[in-house]
Image: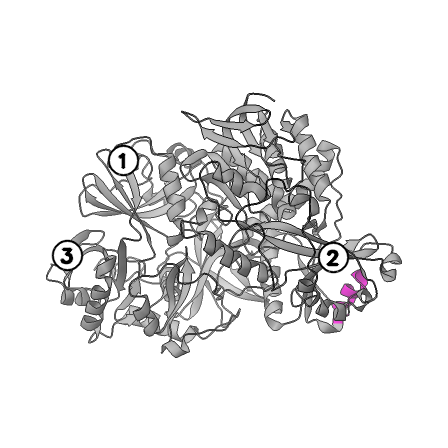
């Protein structure tokens, strides 16, 4: 075994082999793969092999489409068969809600250009004569889908990587990992010690064990997954062609042809975790004992809907461990504080996603960033709330819901109440209906009473529509209160804090104590990594506010760039709770609860002051995300209940009303404000996102500056554009395709119905000189849309600066 490599990939399943291959395809040759047993040992070898493009996240869907397209090229490059059966896939709907989901995905697929389309039942029967179509409401067909040979794919990756210079060491488990001074890692194996500049943990079922060698706990755990293979079915033998992969969501079953029989799998409700405390080190190319009692009942519907299966009998049952993350997506990317240590694990859809994961991780290593927004798979989407109990609860829920199609307004019940503010009970009593952001309970909307705080999952207007309308009217006409405790709050302090942070943020820092600035955080390629509000608390102390889900993501980035020991970055999210008050009466309310000067002169726009709210000392920020006059008020957690009661009492005569995230989303769209994770992500540059005014290339060097300067010499291909959409129900919520002259050209990054103006508003990245009318497809409806050159609400910003 060699003694040194640029990259050491640990794990020889389909994901590890893909990372290795993609590193070589990007030009890195000094790369090795260490496999504890044989290639594919663990989960890969017994996978059902299905490949699909369908995914609720557009970027993940595009990576899955890339993976499927890659397999033909991989066969050509390696000379190894991937066992491609591109039969297509029939997706079947029984309920109206499933049909609505199909309409939504069909609309999105037009923009992604993946070929997903509706078919009639005559075509269903022609493609798969075993199906009794009378049971179904609708069907879709994706011609790209099918299945591959897991072993063939893995060996094709491995052969292509070897041919390009990579080395693979089988029967070489990693038994110890040590960080050396500088950037390198020392990996101990039974065959010697390897030093590597980068390490990638792609160890699959053993990814937790490898991570623990580095003193890291990963938010993943295996579950048992079973499928069965039937004996020969005579009807199949006489067809002369393979039937398509078939998925029945109501029946909770997937199946494909295997020889002249069927491979049939389900995600049963009575699921089982496996090896919760750790995967046995002596486990290899093995299966778990079958437990057919748990899957027989779920298969009952399929036997009724495909009666040809009844007499076939079971030839074989496969029960194997599959690694799950809490939301079912992989966990990839650099580990916190370790920019040269990567993970690529938790890939329960490894055959569908291996190519995309390998490409993203390899780019991340070679280029310093993955080349597209992969936050839906980024390990940093989980913070320290994702402990072992949380992971078990959420992975069980995710497994049980693999065939329950989600609606836009659906909030899942597992592992709730993990992070709550001191006023959670009071907000619930006020009728709050909560959602979750980074495990934090966030009010979405307020019902008339706690007893009415419920809405059924739907793609249409729900029970929240009228209450959200009332919340929006209250903010626009009086004053509303929104709890901001969930926002991430990061303190940057130290003698050199300002100089260091100035090299990270794209905008000027606030120059004076008490002033506020808004700033993007950019990647080296000049893409938007983050979007923060910066408050200067003192000469050497600054406080950053951002989206709840971004905290671990931002902390990782800051720590990776933290070379100066005189600078510290720490989270104050748990220490500081908060509220926003906003609306024409917000100043009147604030004046009633403090003796401080809160006039426009005493507390001007984009400034902050310490002041007493009732008996509690609070930090008050003058800013607004609704476009109205507004303030954010932050206090220690043990003061929050007092501040809340003080505001409620003082606001009674002003008709103070609670409002939630749904209203906030509609209000910020009316003002033309984008938000991180929707409009602002690493898919876009600040110029494209209309954020150039917050990027100051004249201030000196900062991350991404050179890329921004270079981009300014080129014409913009697309720019963030606000659309007015004539919707009546259903309304767009984000992800819907935008059509120009009948052709899909973009998708909505976010959208909501404007209760102020009576139509929907949505953002999309469109050609900057576009003047043609557009359409937005919501489910099956094409809705007229107008390009707005300025925000419909107070475009000059006079109200929030009043």
Q: Farthest residue in the top direction?
A: 3
Name the residue rendered at 69%, 45% in the picture. Answer: 286
Q: Is residue 524 above or below residue 642?
A: above
**Label 2 vs label 1: CA separation?**
57 Å
Residue beneath the point at 66% across and 44% down: 44
Q: Where residue 228 is drawn, which disc sits there?
A: 2
Label annotation for residue 403: none
From the viewer's perspective, is the residue at label 1 or at label 3 nearer?
1
Bounds of the magenta segment: 121-133
Up-down relation of residue 462 to residue 191 (above or below): below
How many numbered marks are there?
Answer: 3
Q: Which is the main secondary structure of the residues drawn in magenta?
A: helix
292 part of magenta stretch: no
Of the numbered discs in the image, which one, if any, rests on residue 567? 1
454 relative position to 567: left or right: right
Q: Secondary structure at mark 3?
A: strand
* Depth order, front residue of 462/173: 173
The answer to which of marks 1 and 3 sits earlier in the sequence is 1
Q: Which residue is mark 3?
A: 611
Q: In the figure, residue 191 lies in which quadrant?
A: top right
Q: Position of residue 26 (x, y in %)?
A: 58, 30
């Amino acid at each position: 075994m060699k003694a040194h490599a640029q990259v050491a990939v640990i794990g020889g399943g389909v994901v590890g082999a893909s990372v290795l291959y993609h590193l070589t395809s990007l030009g890195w040759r000094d790369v090795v793969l260490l496999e504890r047993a044989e290639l594919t040992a663990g989960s890969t070898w017994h996978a059902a092999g299905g490949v699909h493009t369908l995914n609720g996240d557009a970027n993940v869907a595009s990576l899955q489409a890339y993976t499927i397209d890659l397999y033909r090229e991989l066969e050509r490059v390696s000379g190894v068969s991937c066992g491609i059966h591109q039969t297509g896939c029939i997706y079947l709907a029984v309920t109206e809600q499933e049909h609505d989901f199909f309409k939504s995905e069909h609309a999105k697929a037009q923009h992604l250009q993946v070929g997903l389309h509706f078919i009639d039942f005559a075509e269903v029967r022609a493609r798969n004569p075993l199906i009794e179509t009378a049971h179904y409401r609708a069907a879709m067909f994706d011609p790209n889908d099918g299945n591959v040979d897991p072993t063939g794919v893995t060996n094709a990756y491995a052969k292509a990587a070897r041919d390009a210079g990579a080395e693979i060491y089988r029967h070489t488990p990693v038994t110890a990992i040590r960080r050396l001074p500088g950037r390198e890692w020392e990996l101990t194996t039974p065959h010697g010690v390897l030093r590597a500049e980068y390490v990638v943990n792609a160890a699959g079922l053993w990814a937790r064990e490898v991570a623990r060698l580095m003193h890291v706990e990963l938010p993943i755990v295996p579950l048992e997954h079973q499928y069965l293979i039937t004996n020969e079915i005579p009807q199949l033998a006489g067809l002369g062609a393979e039937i398509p992969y078939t998925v029945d969501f109501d029946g909770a079953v997937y199946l494909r042809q295997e020889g002249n029989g069927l491979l049939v799998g389900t995600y049963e409700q009575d699921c089982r975790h496996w090896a919760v405390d750790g995967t046995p080190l002596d486990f290899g190319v093995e299966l778990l004992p079958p437990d057919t009692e748990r899957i027989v009942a779920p298969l009952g519907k399929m036997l009724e809907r495909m009666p040809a299966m009844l007499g076939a009998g079971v030839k074989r049952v496969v029960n194997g461990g599959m690694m799950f993350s809490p939301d079912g997506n992989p966990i990839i990317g650099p580990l916190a504080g370790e920019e040269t240590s990567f993970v690529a694990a938790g890939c329960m859809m490894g055959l569908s996603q291996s190519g995309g994961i390998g490409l993203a991780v390899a780019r991340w290593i070679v280029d310093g960033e993955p080349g597209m927004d992969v936050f839906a798979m980024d390990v940093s989407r989980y913070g320290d709330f994702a402990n072992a109990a949380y992971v078990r609860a959420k992975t069980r829920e995710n497994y049980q819901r693999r065939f329950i199609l989600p609606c836009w307004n659906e909030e899942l019940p597992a592992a709730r109440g993990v992070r709550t503010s001191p006023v959670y009970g009071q907000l619930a009593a006020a009728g709050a209906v909560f959602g979750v952001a980074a495990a934090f309970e966030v009010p979405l909307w307020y019902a008339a009473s706690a007893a009415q705080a419920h809405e059924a999952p739907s793609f249409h207007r729900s029970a929240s529509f009228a209450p959200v309308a009332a919340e929006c009217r209250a903010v626009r006409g009086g004053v509303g209160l929104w709890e901001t405790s969930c926002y991430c709050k990061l303190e940057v302090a130290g003698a050199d804090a300002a100089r260091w942070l100035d090299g990270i943020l794209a905008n000027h820092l606030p120059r004076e104590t008490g002033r506020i600035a808004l700033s993007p955080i950019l990647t080296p390629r000049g893409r938007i990594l983050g979007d923060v509000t910066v408050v200067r608390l003192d000469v050497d102390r600054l406080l950053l506010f951002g989206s709840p889900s971004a905290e671990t993501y931002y902390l990782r980035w800051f720590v990776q760039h933290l070379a100066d020991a005189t600078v510290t970055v720490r989270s104050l999210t748990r220490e500081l709770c908060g509220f926003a008050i906003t609306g024409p009466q917000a100043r009147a309310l604030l004046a009633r609860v403090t003796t401080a000067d809160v006039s426009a002169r005493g507390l001007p726009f984009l400034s902050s002051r310490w002041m007493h709210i009732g008996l509690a000392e609070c930090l008050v920020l003058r800013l607004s995300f609704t476009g109205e006059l507004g303030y954010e008020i932050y206090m220690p957690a043990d003061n929050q209940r007092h501040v809340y009661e003080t505001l409620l009492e003082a606001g009674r005569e002003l008709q103070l009303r609670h409002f939630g995230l749904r209203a906030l989303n509609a209000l910020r769209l009316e003002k033309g404000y984008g938000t991180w994770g929707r409009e602002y992500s690493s898919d876009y540059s600040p110029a494209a996102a209309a954020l150039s005014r917050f990027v100051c290339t004249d201030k000196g060097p900062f991350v991404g500056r050179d890329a921004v300067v270079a981009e300014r010499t080129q014409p913009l291909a697309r720019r963030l554009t606000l659309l007015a959409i004539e919707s009546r129900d259903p309304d767009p919520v984000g992800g819907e395709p935008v059509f120009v002259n009948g052709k899909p050209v973009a998708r909505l990054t976010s959208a909501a119905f404007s209760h102020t103006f009576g139509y929907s508003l949505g953002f999309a990245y469109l050609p900057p000189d576009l003047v043609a009318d557009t359409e937005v497809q919501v489910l099956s409806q094409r809705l007229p849309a107008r390009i707005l050159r300025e925000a419909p609400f107070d475009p000059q910003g006079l109200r929030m600066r009043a």
